[in-house]
């Protein structure tokens, strides 16, 4: 596939790196929490399916949108051919009765109507097959979500299996959005989750996006024509921007007459809603492509093609109710924020990299793979807090449990009456300890 990528782990692909990050964390529970797959506290093993489904809304929403689109397109074809057939039938009958057409001409007209009806039948069969595919995918997805409701505990082995399927879905979604369609298809086929991911939708989206980046509007205009009835109510500007870009390209080539004709045919009809844009476009006729005058310089620049590609992706995702961000990003952000604490980015390193520290940690946020990713994320609000029953504060402001602190200080060989901060390795007199009262 096109494009280059430098891996951060043993794997050399996007999927390999993401899998490696998850597998490198200590324990499947931490893998699930970092990926947003386990939202309960460590102290609880009760599974709350509703919290899991917050991330899985597109799983059912997209098939519903595809089914709605399929039905509307089928209805449009039926209505269009119905008008043509009824009109042709009425005209043929009147001409036959009045003698304007010979019997052979009447039979030819009837044959044409029959052929049109056969073509309509073939189109309906195609729509029916698409509908059957959508129903099959919806059934598989409902079964997948239903399996979650049959699991009562996070400790159940079935939950690990369900989470692994979800992780594979997130990885396929990430690969598709990144343009790695072949890798995504291979991964979905290997894991047997083709009906749980939206391969065709994203592959088509990527093809149109790439055609715009290659400075071609043909594929995107065809997509707009196919989905015009669905996008009309949203006041979408994609088709107008594409027609404007065609106008700009004609002006670049010096085809002023063709540019004016194009504007009169496709652009001037939007005067009521797009007057400022049309006014600026008219100004291009008086400025050559080499102009440095704004906004015409920007309108002539190649960056407009990137703008059109991004606008198409946004329009496509909005139409099918898809998140604009990869689900993997959403899951990672939620999981990392849920686990992040101020100590994760403290200047005092844990025992894994600091020999003088006596603390131990299995926190995934403190790992080298995820620490930088979580640095700029916000902390989440925790409804439950766990504190020692006998909290004390050291002169440096750090709070610990008295009993555990004294026990640890004795184990490291300190003389009686001395305590050691397990994080900073500072040593203090026991008399300097002050009791903490939680209010």
Image: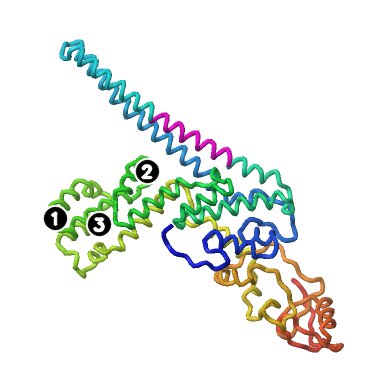
Residue 274 image point, x, y percent? 27, 52
Q: Is residue 431 above or below residue 324?
A: below
Q: Earlier in the sequence, mark 3 or mark 1?
A: 1
In what element is the residue under mark 1? helix
Evaluate whether residue 96 shows in this view: yes
Part of the protein shown in magenta: 123-140
Q: What is the spatial separation of the Cα atoms under label 3 and label 2, in whole angstroms?
A: 22 Å
Under tag 3, what secondary structure?
helix
State the mark number for residue 276.
3
Q: Quadrant of the N terminus?
A: bottom left
* Quadrant of image for the C terminus: bottom right
User: As drawn, is 334 to the left or to the right of 281?
Assistant: right
Classified by dominant secondary structure, the portion drawn in magenta counts as helix
Cα separation, mark 2 vs mark 1, equals 33 Å
Q: Could you tell me which residue is drawn at 38 percent across and 31 percent down?
A: 123
Q: Is residue 202 left or right of residue 136?
A: left
Of residues 96 and 396, which is closer to you in this image? 96
Dividing the picture into quarters, in which one does residue 170 lie?
Answer: bottom right
Which is closer to the viewer, label 2 or label 1? 1
Which of the two residues, 216 or 50, is positioned nearer the viewer here? 216
Locate residue 84, reporting x and y percent. 28, 25
The spot of residue 143 in percent (x, y) is 62, 40
Mark 2 or mark 1: which comes first in sequence?
2
Query: What residue is disc 2 on?
Result: 233
Res. 296 image quadrant: bottom left
State the colouring used for the structure image. rainbow
Q: Which mark is residue 256?
A: 1
Tell me whether circle 2 and circle 1 mark residues in contact (CB < 8 Å).
no
């Amino acid at each position: 596939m096109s494009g280059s990528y430098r891996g951060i782990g043993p794997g050399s692909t996007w999927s390999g790196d993401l899998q490696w990050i998850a597998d490198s964390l200590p324990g499947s529970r931490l893998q699930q929490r970092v990926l947003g797959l386990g939202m309960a506290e460590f102290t609880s093993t009760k599974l709350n399916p509703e919290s899991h489904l917050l991330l899985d809304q597109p799983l059912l929403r997209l098939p519903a949108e595809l089914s709605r689109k399929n039905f509307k397109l089928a209805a449009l074809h039926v209505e269009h051919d119905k008008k043509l057939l009824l009109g042709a039938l009425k005209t043929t009958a009147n001409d036959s009765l009045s003698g304007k057409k010979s019997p052979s001409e009447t039979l030819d007209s009837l044959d044409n109507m029959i052929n049109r009806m056969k073509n309509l039948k073939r189109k309906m069969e195609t729509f029916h097959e698409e509908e059957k595919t959508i129903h099959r995918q919806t059934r598989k997805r409902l079964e997948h979500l239903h399996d979650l409701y049959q699991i009562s505990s996070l400790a159940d082995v079935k939950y690990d299996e369900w989470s692994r399927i979800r992780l594979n879905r997130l990885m396929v979604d990430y690969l598709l959005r990144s343009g790695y369609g072949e890798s995504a298809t291979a991964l979905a086929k290997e894991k047997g989750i083709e009906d749980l991911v939206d391969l065709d939708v994203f592959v088509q989206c990527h093809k149109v996006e790439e055609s715009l980046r290659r400075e071609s509007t043909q594929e995107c205009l065809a997509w707009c024509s196919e989905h015009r009835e669905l996008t009309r109510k949203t006041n979408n500007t994609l088709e107008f921007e594409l027609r404007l870009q065609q106008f700009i390209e004609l002006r670049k080539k010096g085809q002023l007459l063709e540019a004016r004709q194009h504007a009169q045919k496709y652009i001037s009809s939007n005067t009521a809603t797009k007057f400022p844009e049309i006014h600026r476009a008219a100004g291009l006729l008086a400025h050559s492509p080499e102009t440095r005058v704004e906004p015409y310089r920007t309108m002539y620049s190649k960056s407009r093609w990137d703008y059109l590609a991004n606008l198409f992706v946004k329009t496509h995702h909005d139409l099918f109710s898809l998140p604009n961000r990869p689900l993997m990003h959403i899951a990672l952000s939620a999981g990392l924020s849920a686990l992040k604490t101020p100590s994760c980015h403290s200047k005092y390193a844990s025992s894994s990299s600091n020999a003088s520290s006596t603390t131990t940690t299995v926190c995934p946020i403190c790992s080298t793979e995820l620490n930088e990713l979580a640095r700029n994320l916000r902390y989440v609000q925790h409804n439950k807090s766990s504190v020692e029953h006998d909290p004390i504060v050291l002169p440096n402001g750090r709070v610990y449990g008295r009993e555990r602190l004294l026990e640890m200080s004795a184990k490291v060989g300190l003389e009686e009456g001395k305590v050691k901060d397990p994080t900073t390795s500072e040593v203090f007199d026991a008399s300097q300890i002050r009791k903490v009262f939680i209010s």
